[in-house]
Amino acid sequence: MNTNGNLYTIIYTSVIVVLVAALLAFVSQSLKAKQEANEKADIMSQMMTADGIGSKASFQEIGNAAVLEKYAGEISEAFLVNAKGEKTADIDLSDVWSPSLLKAQNNQIKKGELDAVEVPVFKFKNGTTVVPIYGAGLWGPVWGYIAFEADGKTMIGSYFDHESETAGLGARIKDDTAFQDEFTGEMADFTQGRIFEIVKGGAPKEGGKSVLDNKIDAITGATMTSQGLNEAINNWLAVYKAYLTNVKTEEE
Amino acid sequence: MDAKIKETILNPIFKGNPITVLVLGICSALAVTVTLKGALVMALSVIVVTGVSCLVLSLLRNTIPSRVRIIIQLVVVSMMVILVDQVLKSFEATYAIDRQLSVYIGLIITNCIVMGRIEAFALGNKPWPSFLDGLANGVGYGLILIIVAFFRELFGSGTLFGIQVMPAGYVPNNLIILPPAALILLGCIVWVQRGIQKDLQEK
């Protein structure tokens, strides 16, 4: 049989592609539930890591079921707020806000549709608030969670994740706990245009120790990822500004 | 076992090792060898991808139109890579490792070992030897990955498979964590191999 004819080539390629596509679609559908369960537990442990409830490694050790249980015991409220700081809808306490949902809101924020955008807030029983951020790194999206004290501006910690940043450089926003720990004790400055700053070349220091303001050190060798994360934090915290500053006045 | 099959299996492990002799698959060998766990998962993934891709393409070899054979190869290899990625994401035990390996699982498709073995072997041989050849090349690749990862995790983090083995006072060597250290280690392995296997040395 002539396997080099045009018709044969076209039919052969089409059949192979359709078969492969069907197989992949089937596998993807049948594994989806399991993958989503893994992602959910991962997001919960990321939020709790940012909030200082435990370390990411420790959550990994205890497994998905225990993470869900721990999260259920810690979370007190979850809801959406708009850019005016008003609560618009509740989020089911067993639900998390996956990066794919954050992406849609990030598009709204980037387009400047601040009247329409609604962003999630997670309040924990210890009085802390965790908010997500999302933006563009060097190769793909970066996102993460920042935890605030009850005053709405002192940071407890952070956890960042990414899709495809360079291993050993940009990927350190996720892997390097020392970078994430830099956020601890820093203050978001809602009085200025720039709420938070990841500084290339080093944040101001006193006696070798970081000054607790709104500036931290960027990652050496990961300029674009650091800048992307910086933009993500500023864009998103600008939306949370009304909500987080209101929290403060309520306390006072 | 006849001599030819034996040669097919043993050659890629040492004498014709894809990394140290053919110098293929270097990129991922540098990137995923920081921890043994990551290296092991990567090695298993590559073994499965090369083995099954070689088997499938060897079965199809007489029907593939030669003008589009590279495209057909890519379709089969990418299917295998996506399947492996999907399976890794589905299990609790491997989800975190899959996230840690991030793009490198997807990049198995660009691993020259896979396409190289398909072009050089699977398209001209019967399914069974092709399958063994694919597996053996994957094993040869994985073996080097694990040797490099052993040293990088031991001296870079003081652990093996995440378990602390170095004494408490050990200060981890940061150079070992960085990709250049993997290249240096790889160079040492090539050096040792060429010392043993004199016919590889250039005059």
Image: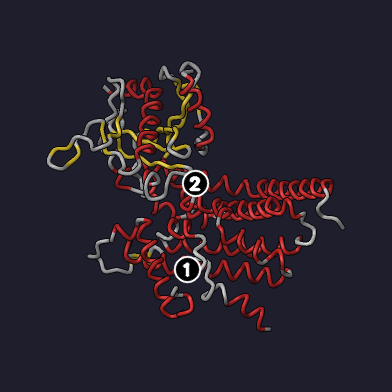
Would you place residue A226 above or below residue A244 in this image? Answer: below
User: In terms of depth relative to the viewer, which is nearer, A90 or A180?
Assistant: A180
Q: Nearer the viewer, residue A68 or B52?
A: B52
The amino acid type of the residue labelled 1 equals Thr
Which marked residue is nearer to the observer: mark 1 or mark 2? 1
Residue at the image position 37 percent from the left and 66 percent from the top: B185
- Chain of the residue under label 2: A
Q: Rate crowding at label 1 as few (under 14), some (14 to 19) or many (20 or more) other CA atoms within 10 Å.
A: many
**Residue, disc 1:** B20
Q: Which quarter of the figure has residue B188?
A: bottom left
Disc 1, SS: loop
Q: Is residue A196 above or below residue B165?
A: above
Measured as percent of width and height from the top left, residue A161 is found at 43, 42
Query: x and y percent of residue A249 in the render?
Result: 29, 20
Placement of A83 over or under B13, stated as above or below: above
Q: Which residue is denoted by mark 2 in the rendering?
A: A41
Give the residue displayed 49% in from the left and 66% down from the top: B19
Q: Residue at x 68, y 83 (%)?
A: B2
Position of B102 relative to B21 (above/below): above
Would residue B32 be found to the left or right of residue B84 on screen? left
